[in-house]
Amino acid sequence: MKQERAVRTRQLLIRSAAEAFERHGFIRARLADISSSAGVTTGALHFHFANKEALASTVEATAAVILRHAARSVQQPGANALQRLTGVSHALADRLRHDVVARAGFRLNCGDGPHPGALDLRGEWFECIRRLLTEAGDHHLLAEGVARQDAAASIAAATTGFEVLGRTDPAWLSPASLSCFWRLALPRLATAEALAALGLPAGEPVRRPHDVKILENKN
Amino acid sequence: MKQERAVRTRQLLIRSAAEAFERHGFIRARLADISSSAGVTTGALHFHFANKEALASTVEATAAVILRHAARSVQQPGANALQRLTGVSHALADRLRHDVVARAGFRLNCGDGPHPGALDLRGEWFECIRRLLTEAGDHHLLAEGVARQDAAASIAAATTGFEVLGRTDPAWLSPASLSCFWRLALPRLATAEALAALGLPAGEPVRRPHDVKILENKN
């Protein structure tokens, strides 16, 4: 029973710390507020965490567990790489939108925390994008002339934008918001057959690659 | 001569403050370091700026001037709305990449500063996106079935991502990075004629709108 209570207290402190980090930022968050929001004494807080840095590291590590679990939970057998890519993006956005520990931990890990650690959550997501696009290419799901690097960079930038904008307005992390982007990107990215597998009408000609040098900045 | 020197000192202080805010964040940046980097005494700093908040506000206001000027400078007579949209995106990215005052001011204004003011630089950019997409629609430059709101949200998210990722790695703000995104988005967004005006090969069938309900999160 005593051990159960300790586990419960620890979870309350992690959540309370995530709320404080989100509201005030790491530097301004106060341990006294974190312990009182969790309904425990500062002594109890220090039993679990040596200092604010230790709390921040634990919030980050917990976010990693939550987000990796969410990413794995949408992996259905038989789903192709593009289906998995959109599925993982929605699963991550859902956790960031609804779970303050995931949101605060991700943000701390992206440079708002006390110091860089071994964990790189944004890097993990970008690696997941690259891996799934490589697999999509290998399985002939990508439209002719789509450069995987272009696609990976665009998806990385857009999803980073949704995460950052979602910090102040959760609507940016809604399924509808994310779908806006996929509706724009997928018809360019995927072959007609792959679009059909994604539930999109197939049978339309696939666009050719374009030379867009003129779009680059001339300055 | 005295007035010229005062103007010059003020500019040096703004630049030095921008560098300090970028390196240490607003809270941790120290006025003593800002004045010594600018080669002036703290007394001279206080002649120009009452406190750190006043310095931050001036960095933000200066960033606004720089970015609005950059956006206007690429407006060529006769360019259509999509050409202007890509042009402005490149011009803003160029300033954020090369000018520490633009970069630090934009970041302070996006929530890293001391308090929210009247200035909303991200909001101004999003409004610019919406205005140009509306104009593009009115001038029949948008492919059939493209929802302007979808396009605006995607462009807003992706460019926010480029800005945020560019804070730690300027390569994200390079013309090549931004072009990755436009190469992906424009063939879906624009009519064949508009693509031709953007220097893209025209004459290909325009894709139809798709129903992508299946892409939305089922959780």
Image (tube, coloured by chain):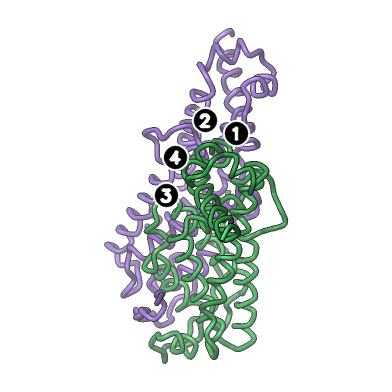
Chain colours: A purple, B green
Looking at the picture, how far across and down is residue A89, in whole percent? 48, 53
Dot 4 and dot 2 residues touching (CB under 8 Å)? no
**Secondary element at image label 3:** loop
Which callout, 1 or 2, points to the residue nearer the camera?
1
Residue A118 sits in quarter: top left
Label whose residue precedes the other's in the sequence (1 or 4)? 1
**Secondary element at image label 2:** helix
Q: Amino acid at mark 2?
A: Val
Which callout, 1 or 3, points to the residue nearer the camera?
3
Which callout, 4 or 3, points to the residue nearer the camera?
3
Q: Which residue is located at x 59 percent, y 44 percent?
A: B45
Residue at label 3?
B168
Between A90 and B133, which is closer to the camera in this rendering? B133
Mark-to-mark CA distance, 1 and 3: 21 Å
Label whose residue precedes the other's in the sequence (4 or 2)? 2
The numbered dot on residue A21 is 1
Looking at the picture, how far across and down is residue B78, in whole percent? 54, 91
Q: Which residue is located at x 46 percent, y 58 percent?
A: A157
Mark-to-mark CA distance, 3 and 2: 22 Å
Assess disc 1: are there few (<14), some (14-19) or many (≥20) residues with their C-alpha within 10 Å of its C-alpha: many
